[in-house]
Image (cartoon, helix red, strand yellow):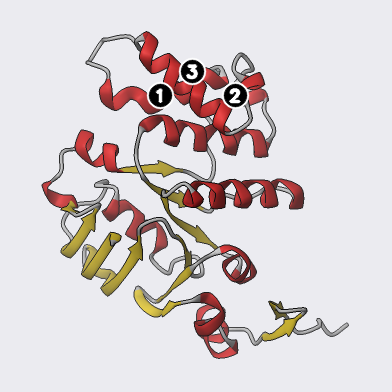
Amino acid sequence: MNAIMVSELEFSYGDAGVLCGVSFSVEEGSMCALLGKNGSGKTTLFGCMLGLLGGYSGSIMIDGAEAKSLSPQALSQRAAYVPQAHNPVFNYSALDMVLMGRANGIRVFGAPSKADVAKAETAMERMGIAELRDRGFLHLSGGERQLVLIARAIAQGANIFIMDEPTSGLDFGNRLLVMRTIRSLTNEGRTVLFSTHEPQQALDHADRLIALADGTAAAEGIPGEVLDSALIERLYGVHADIAAVSGRRVLLPPMTEL
């Protein structure tokens, strides 16, 4: 079953076309990488999927329902967004940040219930960050912040996670930690669509790859089958070979001439 299905999606900012007939699907319980350079349409695509950008044509099905037909609350119950960076004005505690994921079930001017707090605490325990609950979010490391944001998405109660470059700005160890954490979510049946600038990340972690180039879906399929030198050159304008090393597909960028 497909958790996400996008069909013939078109979107423009005025006369400037950004998405042109984009179609793809993401299977339930899978981890899908959205690959493309800056300006390829990744952020616009996410905006349409999350109900932040209207006026598109085509169809976006989220968990079996047309996104346009869903209220913001109903959409948030199906899909949770994890940004690449988040700097709140106030230094909320990590627990308060996770509790914000429960907002779709709290009445206007209402307060989180004991059940909401329990779900937030459970999400933090699931992410292995329970000890951070009283720490100020702005005082956390980049990796810790990202885990808090993922915990917030878990607390939201959605089964689909849309992540915008979840490892951007993280060091090597935290990148691996976050990617392994994302994989554990799909092992539990959740669906993850994440954007990345790193082709190797798609090769190492994703079940499926969608490549955007100039607002169109340049390729879709199993990363090891569709990601080749020709696609890299189309996406980024550079040549790079992909070789099999100890059973692993590895990107080999050309050496820089001195």
Please state which amino acid type lies under the numbered disc 1. Answer: Met
Mark 1 = which residue?
A: 100
Whichever of labels 2 and 3 marks the residue nearer the N terminus, that label is 3
Please state which amino acid type lies under the numbered disc 2. Answer: Phe
Residue 115 as seen in the image, left or right of residue 257: left
Whichever of labels 1 and 2 marks the residue nearer the N terminus, that label is 1
Q: CA distance from mark 1 to mark 2?
A: 13 Å
**Circle 1: element type:** helix
Asked if disc 2 and disc 3 are in contact, CB closer than 8 Å, the reply is: yes
Residue at left offset 66%, top offset 39%:
143
Closer to us: 77 or 219: 77
Percent position of residue 40, x then y: 42, 69
Percent position of residue 250, x then y: 70, 77
Mark 2 = which residue?
A: 137
Mark 3 = which residue?
A: 96
Quarter location, residue 119 = top left
Q: Residues within 10 Å of mark 2 (few under 14, many from 20)?
A: many
The mark total stands at 3
**Circle 3: element type:** helix
Please state which amino acid type lies under the numbered disc 3. Answer: Asp
Which one is in front in this view, the residue at disc 2 or the one at disc 3? 3
Residue at left offset 27%, top offset 73%:
23
- Compared with 46, 115 (above or below) is above
